[in-house]
Image: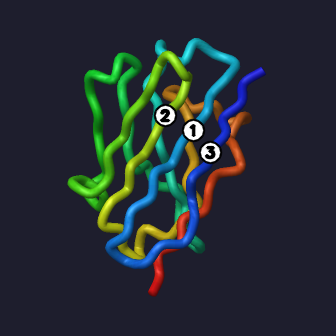
């Protein structure tokens, strides 16, 4: 049974940092690119960052490039998202998923709120 469990969100002031984690079970984690997405209120889901199965290649949305760092630990079946210099526009519910997306297995997400 596939499970994607996000954690690590919270409230932070602008300029602060958070580290999100995504714990995965139910498929061969190291074989898949992992992605972080976010959905802000009233907006479409947005791809934030991706990392190849072996961790050798990463990609970022222009809005977060230089501030966010995606990582993974294949021994622990965990993907991470280090978010630095957070801005109010980063406020959203953050989700992880693999590529190809498991449309029926989205987790509950973890809420990130950036405000003063």
The x and y percentages for residue 66 are 21, 54
Quadrant position of residue 3: top right
Tell me what residue is drawn at x 47 percent, y 15 percent.
30
- Callouts 1 and 3 close, C-beta under 8 Å: yes
Return the residue found at the far bottom.
116
| Disc ID at residue 22 | 1
Q: In the rendered view of the protein, which quadrant contains the N terminus?
A: top right
Vertical comparison of 14 with 101: above or below: below
Give the CA separation, mark 2 to mark 3: 9 Å
Q: Which residue is mark 2?
A: 79
**SS assignment at label 2:** strand
**SS assignment at label 1:** strand
Q: Which residue is mark 3?
A: 6
Give the CA separation, mark 1 to mark 2: 5 Å
Q: Nearer the viewer, residue 63 or 19?
A: 19
Q: Earlier in the sequence, mark 1 or mark 3?
A: 3
Tell me what residue is drawn at x 53 percent, y 61 percent.
44
Q: In the rendered view of the protein, which quadrant contains the C terminus?
A: bottom left
Vertical comparison of 63 with 98: above or below: below
Vertical comparison of 10 with 82: above or below: below
- Callouts 1 and 2 close, C-beta under 8 Å: yes
The x and y percentages for residue 31 are 47, 13
Q: Earlier in the sequence, mark 2 or mark 3?
A: 3
Return the residue found at the far right.
1
Return the residue found at the far left.
66
């Amino acid at each position: 049974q596939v499970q994607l469990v996000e954690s690590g969100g919270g409230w932070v002031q602008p300029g602060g940092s958070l580290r999100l984690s995504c714990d995965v079970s139910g498929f061969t984690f190291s074989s898949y690119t992992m992605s972080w997405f976010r959905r802000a209120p009233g907006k479409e889901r947005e791809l934030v960052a991706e990392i190849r199965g072996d961790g050798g290649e990463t990609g970022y949305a222009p809005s977060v490039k230089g501030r966010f760092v995606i990582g993974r630990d294949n021994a622990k079946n965990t993907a991470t998202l280090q978010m630095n210099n957070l801005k109010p526009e980063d406020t959203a519910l953050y989700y992880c998923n693999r590529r190809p997306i498991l449309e029926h297995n989205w987790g509950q997400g973890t809420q990130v709120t950036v405000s003063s």
